[in-house]
Image (cartoon, helix red, strand yellow):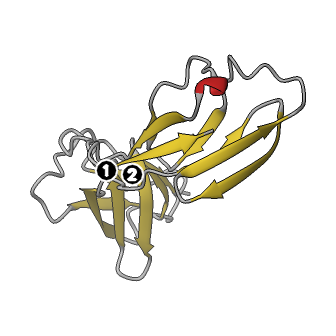
Amino acid sequence: PASEEFEVLDIMVEDAVDYRWDEYGHRIEVDIMYDSALTAIEPVFTLSEFATISPTGPQDFSGTTGITYTVTAQSGAKGTLDWRVIIENTAASMEAYVTSVTHADLVDQAWADTNIVLYFADGTDLTDIQPTFTVSWAATIADTTQGYDFTAGPVTYTVTAQDGVTMMEYLVS
């Protein structure tokens, strides 16, 4: 006998950062990266075995209140179920923080706002130090690919948030 199941079990969208499901209202909201195009998005659905969904293929989610997808059971006997899928760009992150610093010879560190003091093991060559930084989600830190001479004084590292505008300078010594 043909299957009578027609459930949406999962959805995947490229560049998605958050999913919100309303099972009772048959609504799925998806936030994608702030700079991702809303045109030609093709959600990948996981459905009940043998169920089908329509429309298929890439859809234009720009300037819409969503696309209605119809899920149909193989048998068609139980009917269909409509799901409203809304895909929007999320706001760009404005966080530009260093969250941790590591180095093989690092034994301690002291933080005061954007000033970081690193303490290294005795005998560490401080003329070519290349610490590893962890920064806020989607932020970047400039110029950490080379070592610096920390005997010459503090080094300034600039962290740029995802929005490309928000920046914080960290003075590391």
Query: Dot 1: what SS?
Result: loop
- Front-most of residues 92 and 51: 92
| Mark 2 lies on residue | 52
| Mark 1 lies on residue | 166
Establish if 146 lies above or below 111.
above
Residue located 48% across and 24% down the image: 143
The mark that comes first in sequence, 2 or 1, is 2
Residue located 52% across and 43% down the image: 171
Q: Quadrant of the C terminus?
A: top right
Three-letter amino acid code at the position of disc 1:
Thr
Q: Is residue 74 visible?
A: no
Establish if 14 lies above or below 46.
above
Separation (CA) of disc 2 from disc 1: 45 Å
Establish if 103 lies above or below 112.
above
Three-letter amino acid code at the position of disc 2:
Thr
- Front-most of residues 27 and 167: 167
- Front-most of residues 1 and 5: 5
Q: Is residue 25 visible?
A: yes
